[in-house]
Image (cartoon, grey):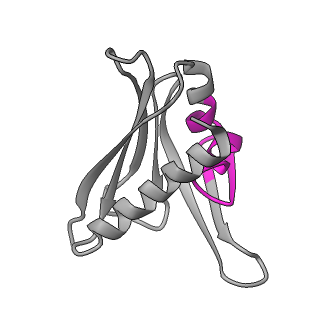
Amino acid sequence: MEKNKITVEHLLNSTSKNIIWQLIGTDSGLQKWIADSVTLDGDQLTCAWGDAHRHHEVRMATVSVIEKYGRIRWSWDDETDGSYVEIRMEKCSLTGGYMLSVTDFTDDGDKDWLEDIWTSNFDRLRRKCGV
């Protein structure tokens, strides 16, 4: 079954490309807003959510693109349909700040759920990092 591509954008309260890149291009940055635990080892990305003693989910991915001050893209290892997650940082010419644009893929009927997940991730980013 073919998945539907979605794009979610979020304007950040930062004009520092270094700060934004640290949040999307490093495991410690991604851990602040994507998952409870993130490890990036070469092109292998591991994300974990939840409490290890209760509900706990771990997903492995392969990073295919890392363009410093540009974007990161990975594909979940348990999906073979060509879908991926891409987080792109773009400078806003009007404000001088940065915007994050996330591209992700979802099954039919799960679009609202996935957009809510990314909105929640952006809220977590704002609370933890102030951007």
Task: State the image coordinates of residue 58 (x, y, percent, origin top left).
Answer: 63, 69
Whether residue 33 appears in magenta in the rendering, the answer is yes
Q: For residue 111, what is the image quadrant?
A: bottom left
Q: Residue at x 57, y 28 (%)?
A: 21
Is residue 89 visible from the viewing direction of this image?
A: yes
In this view, 111 is above or below 25: below
Q: Quadrant of residue 112?
A: bottom left
Residue at position x 63%, y 31% in the image: 22
- Above or below, 40 relative to 6: above
Q: Classify 39 as above or below 79.
A: above
Q: Quadrant of the C terminus?
A: top right
Could you tell me residue 75's position as x and y percent? Answer: 44, 53
Picture residue at 73% right of the left edge, 84% below the top: 54
Query: Nearest the camera: 34 or 99?
Result: 99
Magenta-colored span: 22-45
Q: Is residue 26 magenta?
A: yes
